[in-house]
Amino acid sequence: MKKASLISITALAGASMLLLAGCSSSGGDGGSTDDASATRACVILPDAASSPRWENGDRPALEAAITDAGFEADIQNAQGDTSKYATIADQQLSKGCGVMLLVDYNGAAVAVTAKAQEQGIPVIAYDRPIEGADYYVSFDNEEVGALMGQSILDGLATAGKDPATATVVFMGGDPADGNAKMFRDGAGSVLDPAGVVPAQEPTGVWDGDKSATNFEQALTALGGKVDAVWAANDTNAAGVITILDKNGLTVPVSGQDASVAGLQNVLLGKQTATVYKPFQLEAEAASDLAIKLLNGETPTVDKKLDDGTPYIAVTPVLVGPDDVQKVIDDGNADAAEICTDDVAAACAEHGVG
């Protein structure tokens, strides 16, 4: 598999939007339009800890798109609490929703989806799959995993290591998150043919501190030997890197999200690459779908999940140290925030500023 090349946000947006072509205005599951609730998009975000994107990126992007189209956006955050998730949903449903756009948190969205559909409200699973949802909008999650797997192979090649004999630890995501399996499956599609067998694979989490603890235990079990770490996102990677630093080790580490910490670690050579997923593209695809449903249209989508759920998949991009400036140019990172004193020399070396 070749490393993905960077392409423009505009081109990516155009490609993702093609999947929404062919919409009709024949009604369908768009809900009634005879009351105020039919003009309201109800959105629940999962937390603010697993990624800064939810509050800093997705919330304003979704709100702007939905309100600019003349609809009301009720966007709330469950703050990592499944009980709060359910409470928010009940409050939103009591006020009325024309569509629900849900980011699942530990399975909390499954019951909410069922309640919404009992009221004839279509549900869009956003970023994470939800059992029973009417639509799923996310980046191509298996491709995300494959790109992370490729970054590990690239790093091993640079280090002169044979993938088939390398000691590789897998630090996956929380298995309660349906995306975690797709990331892992995508990684396997690249790493398995290369002969990579996990030397250790602790139970997955979406938590930097827990990831650090789990990795330290795995490293101890391996007698301190590791050649690479497939980490399922930048937060997990950051936890892993603290332990590698503590032990004076530098090995290929994968990640995704193009977070500030992730981009800094990429520039410093502590993380081989990060998978860049411009949230604007995902938010645009989801809000475009929500608006069509609020307008009473029935979108048609070409791609489907294994369970038959219509799936709008947006293309991710692999970012190495020489690609970091692209993320900044897109407005998804700040050079001043990345290029702190300990990263300044690396920024200069790779033309970041």
Image (cartoon, grey):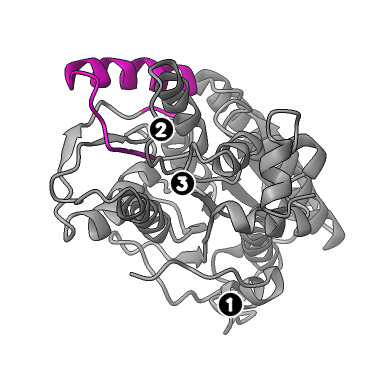
Image position of 238 (left or right of 1):
right
Is the residue marked by circle 3 packed among few (<14), some (14-19), or many (20+) residues within 10 Å? many
Q: Are marks 1 and 3 in contact (CB under 8 Å)?
A: no
Give above or below for 56 relative to 277. above
Q: Label 1 to label 3, Cα distance in Å? A: 27 Å
Which amino acid type is shown beneath numbered disc 1? Ala
Q: Position of residue 155 (x, y in %)?
A: 37, 50
Marker disc for residue 250: 2
Q: Nearer the viewer, mark 3 or mark 2?
A: 2
Q: Are marks 2 and 1 in contact (CB under 8 Å)?
A: no
Q: Are marks 3 and 2 in contact (CB under 8 Å)?
A: no
**Residue at left 63%, top 28%?**
48
Give above or below for 283 relative to 214. below
| Res. 323 visible in picture | yes
Quarter of the view holding residue 89: top right
Q: Position of residue 290 (x, y in %)?
A: 65, 60
Q: Give the range drawn in magenta.
A: 205-231
The residue pinned by badge 1 equals: 15
